[in-house]
């Protein structure tokens, strides 16, 4: 299980940074629009904490897929849910900025007459219509500061029994620039190494990060250019680079669900090969070819 999910805060006291100051929202629940320029700032976690605090069921949807970004999703999924007679429920719609204009227009009417409360999250509020924004209390989330991020990672290290230096934790924080979720993913990756030198190499790969996961994915999955993609990956430490590609694909890349599953399969194969002692160059080449296939 991903540590980012396993150690997700369940109360306001456990929240990281300024998000914990939003506990007053539970006293006057309303439709919310939570936005930030980057991922891992606590938007989705706040929705879980509010639902847990109020004792409301939380229905989670992600609007980034083809099935959940159009008007059919609003009509077939959201309308029945908001007319079921349950006023004490929260509907979380992650990445609401990916909804089509038609879906956003339909959602406006749904929210006006909804039984329950909507929480919308997005990374680009400019793509959310003004009339949807007007139906919500809008809250901007800032990147998590280095100090609270360090404290959270240290807490997880204590729970999971991870031995790591403060400077190594600092490198993880700096490499992920306010994105706590991916920092936790990196910590879990660090803890997965059996050999100290492998863990050190992983940290080194974070320090020397010049590898562009976005360009690499485009080379593999759009341009299908194995000749350039393999040398691009060859200069990197395998596990660190593949983790970065995986994180970018899951969190930021505009990929279909099928393409994301393709990345997951390639990453799992690479990790299995690494554990079995397969040569790094072979791991990298196979990873590229699985993404291109």
Image (spheres, grey):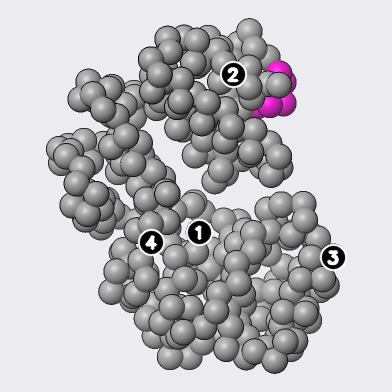
- Mark 4 or 1, nearer chain start: 4
Name the residue beneath numbered marker 2: 288
Answer yes or no: do the residues labelled 3 and 1 have beta carbons within 8 Å? no
Q: Please tell me how crowded label 1 is: few (under 14), some (14-19), or many (20+) other residues with Cα within 10 Å.
A: some
Sequence-earlier tag: 3 or 4: 4
Determine which residue is flagged by label 1. Answer: 36
Query: Which is nearer the eye, 186 or 175?
Result: 186
Mark 2: give few (<14), some (14-19) or many (20+) Cα within 10 Å. Answer: many
On the image, the x and y values in percent for residue 126 come to 65, 60
Identify residue for label 3: 72
- Asked if the residues shown at circle 4 and circle 2 are in contact, with their CB atoms under 8 angstroms apart, the answer is no
Mark 3 and 4 residues: CB-CB less than 8 Å, in contact?
A: no
Considering the numbered disc 2 on the image, is that residue within a helix, a strand or a loop?
helix
Foreground label between 3 and 1 = 3
Q: CA distance from mark 4 to mark 2?
A: 32 Å
Screen quadrant of the C terminus? top right
Q: CA distance from mark 3 to mark 4?
A: 32 Å
Determine which quarter of the picture holds residue 291. top right
Specify the segment rendered in magenta: 218-224
Q: Position of residue 285 (x, y in %)?
A: 55, 12
SS at mark 1 in the image: loop
Q: For this rendering, which residue is in front, 156 or 43?
A: 156
In the image, residue 131 sits, relative to residue 162, either above or below, namely: below
Q: Mark on residue 8?
A: 4
Q: Closest to the observer: 43 or 133?
A: 43
As measured in the structure, the alpha-carbon distance from the residue carrying label 4 to the one carrying label 1 is: 19 Å
Percent from the top left, x then y, of residue 113? 74, 88
The residue at 57%/27% (across/down) is 266
Dot 4 or dot 2: first in sequence order is 4
């Amino acid at each position: 299980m991903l540590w980012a999910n396993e150690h997700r805060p369940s109360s306001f006291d456990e929240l990281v940074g300024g998000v914990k100051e939003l506990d007053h929202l539970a006293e006057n629940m309303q439709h919310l629009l939570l936005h930030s320029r980057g991922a891992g700032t606590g938007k989705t976690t706040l929705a879980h904490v509010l639902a847990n605090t109020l004792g409301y069921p939380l229905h989670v949807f992600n609007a980034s897929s083809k099935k959940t970004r159009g008007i059919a999703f609003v009509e077939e999924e959201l309308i029945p849910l908001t007319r079921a007679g349950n006023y004490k429920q929260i509907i979380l719609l992650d990445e609401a900025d990916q909804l089509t204009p038609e879906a956003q227009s339909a959602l406006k009417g749904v929210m006006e007459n909804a039984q329950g409360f909507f929480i919308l999250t997005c990374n680009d509020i400019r793509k959310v219509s003004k009339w949807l924004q007007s139906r919500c209390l809008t809250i901007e989330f800032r990147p998590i500061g280095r100090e609270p991020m360090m404290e959270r990672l240290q807490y997880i290290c204590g729970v999971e029994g991870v031995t790591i230096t403060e400077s190594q934790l600092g490198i993880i924080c700096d490499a992920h620039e306010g994105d706590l979720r991916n920092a936790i993913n990196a910590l879990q990756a660090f803890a997965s190494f059996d050999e100290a030198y492998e863990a050190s190499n992983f940290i080194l790969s974070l320090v020397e990060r010049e590898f562009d996961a976005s360009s690499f994915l485009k080379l593999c999955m759009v341009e299908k250019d194995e000749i350039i993609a393999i040398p691009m990956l060859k200069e990197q430490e395998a596990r660190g680079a593949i983790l970065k590609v995986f994180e970018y694909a899951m969190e930021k890349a505009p990929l279909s669900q099928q393409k994301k599953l393709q990345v997951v399969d390639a990453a799992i194969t690479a990790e299995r090969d690494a554990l079995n002692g397969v040569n790094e160059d072979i791991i990298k080449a196979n990873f590229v070819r699985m993404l291109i296939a």
